[in-house]
Amino acid sequence: MSNDLNNLPQEKNLVFIDLEQQSGHANKKPVLTLGLHGMHVSVSAAVKMGLKGKKYNYCRFSLVKANDKGHIDRIYIRPEIVSPDERKKKHYLINYSKLGDGAVISGVKTLYDQLPRLKKILEGKFSDRRIELNFCEISKLHYFGLGANFDQTLLSLNKVPKVKAVYRISYKDTIQNIGETNNLARRLKEKGITEVLASKGVTEIPMDKVEYSVMENATDEQRRDCEWEHLNKHKEQFGHYPPFNHQGGRKVQN
């Protein structure tokens, strides 16, 4: 194929717009990527958090429980300059990349153990391990939110806690039902999910795993909002709602 512009169809108003080069972090939102032993800070995140000049050598992760919002806790990242004799267990080392402006926050394995919802993200798909950072105008710090993401797995149907929760029922790693309740133990019985019936394989919903997140501080409306967030996320990923989802007594239309 010829590159000769004379061979192009003749247009009276043919206008060329030159596209300029941009820096690697331009127009990119700041993100952290979770790894087992370290959190990878993107170039854009490092720039916006003031890490580009390698001024800070440690950071702290601080939890703010947002009870007023029901199910979204905030984890603030607080970069600091710490001398060797001042370092404590709350300080996480920042390792700077020799090849670019990104960074890795190391020693975070114990952080995951303290935050089951964060650990749940780490156990998921790699694409879900990229967490977008937000900026807090009050503290002038960056943070990320941790919502109810089914961070607990029910170990026994004989010991279902009577807690307010959002829950997910699966069978052979396929999600069958997502819901919310003010009493998880009662709701599972209503759905015919008990130890006796499960052992006979006659539950209303095919199941081999029940996961949930406790939402004791959330209102009924906030739990329903959380339920719909997960339902919509499921539909975006798979093109339909889980097969055993009902709302208002009617099956959700796929």
Image: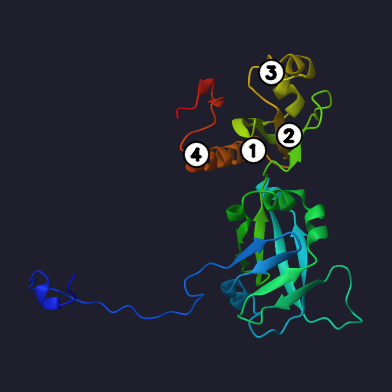
Mark-to-mark CA distance, 3 and 2:
15 Å
Disc on res. 190: 3
Q: Secondary structure at mark 3?
A: helix
* Label pair 1/2, CB-CB below 8 angstroms: yes
Residue 133 position (above or below residue 180): below
Q: Nearer the viewer, residue 195 or 30?
A: 195
Residue type, numbered disc 1: Arg
Q: Nearer the viewer, residue 104 or 111?
A: 104
Residue type, numbered disc 2: Lys
Q: Earlier in the sequence, mark 1 or mark 2?
A: 2
Mark-to-mark CA distance, 3 and 4:
27 Å
Mark 2 surroundings within 10 Å by alpha-carbon count, few (fewer than 14), some (14 through 19), many (20 or more): many
Q: Earlier in the sequence, mark 4 or mark 2?
A: 2
Question: In percent of the image, x 79 and y 29: which residue is there?
Answer: 162
Residue 51 position (above or below residue 201): below
Question: In percent of the image, x 67 and y 38: which residue is there?
Answer: 219
Residue 198 appears in which quarter of the rendering? top right
Residue 138 seen from this side:
no
* Label pair 4/1, CB-CB below 8 angstroms: no
Count of number-bearing discs: 4
Q: Quadrant of the N terminus?
A: bottom left
Mark 2 — residue?
A: 164
Q: Is residue 234 left or right of residue 88?
A: left
Disc on res. 238: 4
Colouring used for the render: rainbow
* Label pair 3/2, CB-CB below 8 angstroms: no
Q: Secondary structure at mark 2?
A: loop
Q: Earlier in the sequence, mark 1 or mark 3?
A: 3
Disc on res. 223: 1
Mark-to-mark CA distance, 4 and 2:
27 Å
